[in-house]
Image: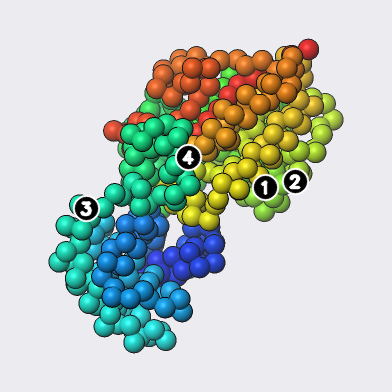
Amino acid sequence: MPRSYADRAVALATLSAVLDRNRPLEEAFDEAAGNGLSARDRGFARLIASTALKRLGQTDALIAHCLEKPLPASAQPVRHALRLGVTQLLFLDVPAHAAIDSAVSLLAKTRHAGFKGLANAVLRRLDREGKALLDDQDAAWLNMPDWLWHALVGAYGEVTARAIAAANMTEPPLDISVKADAALWAERLEGTLLPTGTIRRGFGGAIADLPGYEEGAWWVQDAAAALPARLLGDVAGKDVIDLCAAPGGKTSQLAAAGARVTAIDRSVKRLERLSRNLQRLGLAAATQAADGTAWMPADPADALLLDAPCSATGTIRRHPDVALGKTPADVTKLAALQDRLLDHAAHLVKPGGLLVYATCSLLPAEGEERIAALLDRAAGAWERVPVDPAEIGGWAECMTPDGDVRTLPCHLADEGGVDGFYAARLRRLG
């Protein structure tokens, strides 16, 4: 295979791992890429794989349009190679000769080499007709699982559901949280300082090569993901529990703000990654691998942040694989876990202490409905503390009527969008 197509080979291996073996995109890509690619080729390989997943519904419809009969089930590598070819041709503006030749070359040294002619014919036809066919597609509907599409339309209406889908098809910018001097680091990183305090810059090159990374001045964190920790207010000198803490962005925020943080997570591996990040940043937190529905501290904390396990449907623009294998049944199971975590949190916080509950889900079943259910079954134990937009940079667009925070991927669309998050703040009574 020509060396110039090594990036496409990595993209193909990544796509196969995600779609055939249900591997998370980031893990699949890191394994496929290894250390053999330049930073530029690595970035392009990930862009191809990510875009192919974001546009999977459209791409598959185009391929089906060009086939007289479906590919056999044993020919999944052929389908993946076609997906990558279509992605390059129609969504990444790669020159036709390179997009087509790379897809054919990927098949040449495999047991599916007999499909080279078919792949060549399909891609050449889409080079001629693809743009017109795209115009007739309903991209928002095609690229989203049916159950999720109907859930979003039911929750927000079709216009907003389409805006969310459009945002999910874009490539997100790089968002950065800093320990101090945000304005200074915005200048050094050639980024924009958002009203919420996050620095935003275009993604380019290796993150570790950017100014301030090695010295531990900042960490990567979506602008919406940075909001929940801020809702705890001034935490300097306070005991704060970060339940379900990994990968650690919120732990870093709390530690940088002067809190005495205890980070709890079930995964030893994820906690090790959290600890490495804290070490790079020069921050400290106690860590413990434990089940958040059962763990008990020696003494209740002043505050608790619960970023609960969820469907992660608010992060599709960054992680386009997250919704592919999920079903409504998974959401039901996760909602039950969220309830158990919330119920247990009452034993971890002092009377008068704050609890911030957050999920990176777009679904009310994992957000607003969980808080409503808690306040109903634990009447007299908690009260809602509404958020003032001034606490989050004046961002009134994401405030709910109850005073909770609900960000959508289509918010801040002109600035590059944000992850979908829900956050509510409660105070423990009595």
Image spot of residue 386 (x, y percent): 56, 15
User: Do the CB atoms of the residues marked 1 and 2 lie less than 8 Å apart?
Assistant: yes
Q: Name the residue under label 2.
A: 289
Q: Which residue occupies 19% across, 72% down?
A: 124
Q: Which residue occupies 30% across, 82% down?
A: 116
State the image quarter where residue 199 is shown. top left
Direction right: furthest residue: 298
Question: Badge 2 local density, few (<14 within 10 Å), some, or many (20+)?
Answer: some
For marks 3 and 4, the one nearer the N-term is 3
In this rendering, the label closer to the viewer, 4 or 1: 4
Image spot of residue 188 (x, y percent): 36, 36
Label 4 and label 1: CA atoms lie apart by: 33 Å
For marks 3 and 1, the one nearer the N-term is 3
Label 1 and label 2: CA atoms lie apart by: 7 Å
Q: Is 86 drawn above or below residue 162 in the view shown?
A: below
Q: Name the residue under label 1.
A: 271
Front one among 416 and 249: 416
Q: Mark 3 points at which residue?
A: 136
For marks 4 and 1, the one nearer the N-term is 4
